[in-house]
Image (cartoon, grey):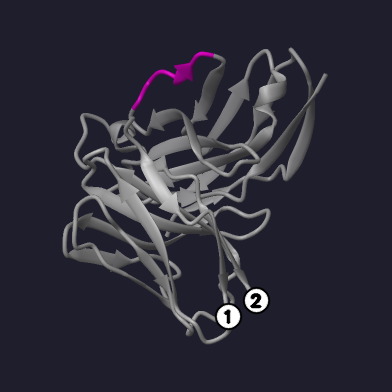
């Protein structure tokens, strides 16, 4: 069975600085996808970025980038130039099967300080 | 605007009572999902459906039931057999069979907070 581990329960970051959120995964499948979602205090889940296991380039979406190290089974999210609105819970997730059932990590709470 | 609508936003259940959470989507997505989130934790899959009139159990299906009579709707019933129902429930939908797995990303509703009286 697949597993996602986020070892940082919470972290502070200064406004305008970059922050890296750790995510490691465990699966024996060769084909899988890795996702990051943001959950503000309002509760909805907002898709941020996706990385496929066969993608050779690290994914980027605006201020979000994914540091994908396949051999180490890690998919860390980097948020550049943090903004106050980035304060939220962040979840790493993985899918291995068709139909895209996602397995989620426990999340990291980020608080951006002005 | 297209999206996923969950109702109600807050729901209270008395002991021994069944309650139903509503989830409607107008994104024309084939797949729909129900997740449970406990405070400070990640999401766990309860049930999912890839086609009308068919659904599969997720990791924590005991005490829950679902139906998929229409493509747009995937209601979740929390039965009296679920002894610890207090949680935040999130419904999601996705396409199936995109060009990449990333095309199959989940779109979420705004959630229902269920509490026990």
The Cα–Cα distance between marks 1 and 2, rounded to whole angstroms, is: 5 Å
Quarter where residue A58 is shown: top left
Q: Which residue is drawn at 72% across and 34% down?
A: A110
Q: In this view, does A22 lie to the left or right of B102?
A: right
Query: Is A9 above or below relative to A77?
Result: below
Q: Are marks 1 and 2 in contact (CB under 8 Å)?
A: yes
The magenta segment: A55-62
Quadrant of the snapshot with the N terminus of chain A: bottom left
SS at mark 2 in the image: loop
Percent from the top left, x then y, of residue B43? 52, 54
> Of the residues under marks 1 and 2, which one precedes in the sequence?
1
Q: Assess disc 1: are there few (<14), some (14-19) or many (≥20) residues with their C-alpha within 10 Å of its C-alpha.
A: few
Q: Which mark is residue B14?
A: 1
Name the residue that disc number 2 marks: B117
Q: Which chain carries label 1?
A: B
Q: Which residue is drawn at 30% across and 42% down?
A: B94
């Amino acid at each position: 069975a697949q597993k996602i581990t986020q070892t940082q329960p919470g972290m502070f970051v200064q406004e305008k600085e970059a922050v890296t959120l750790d995510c490691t995964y465990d699966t024996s499948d060769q084909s899988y996808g890795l996702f990051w979602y943001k959950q503000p205090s309002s509760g909805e889940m907002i898709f941020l970025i996706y990385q496929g296991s066969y993608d050779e380039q690290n994914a980027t979406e605006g201020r979000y980038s994914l540091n994908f190290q396949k051999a180490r089974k890690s998919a860390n999210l980097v948020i550049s130039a943090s903004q106050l609105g980035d304060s939220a819970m962040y979840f790493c997730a993985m899918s291995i099967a068709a139909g895209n059932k996602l397995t989620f990590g426990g999340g990291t709470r980020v608080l951006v300080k002005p | 605007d297209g999206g996923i609508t969950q109702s109600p936003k807050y729901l209270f259940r008395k002991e021994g009572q069944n309650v139903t959470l509503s989830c409607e989507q107008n994104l024309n997505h084939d797949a729909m999902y129900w997740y449970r989130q406990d405070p400070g934790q990640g999401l766990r899959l309860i049930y999912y459906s890839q086609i009308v009139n068919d659904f599969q159990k997720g990791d924590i299906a005991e005490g829950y039931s679902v139906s998929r009579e229409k493509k747009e709707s995937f209601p979740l019933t929390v039965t009296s057999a679920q002894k610890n129902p207090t949680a935040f429930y999130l419904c999601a939908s996705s396409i199936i069979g995109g060009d990449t797995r990333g095309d199959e990303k989940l779109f979420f509703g705004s959630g229902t907070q269920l509490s026990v009286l």
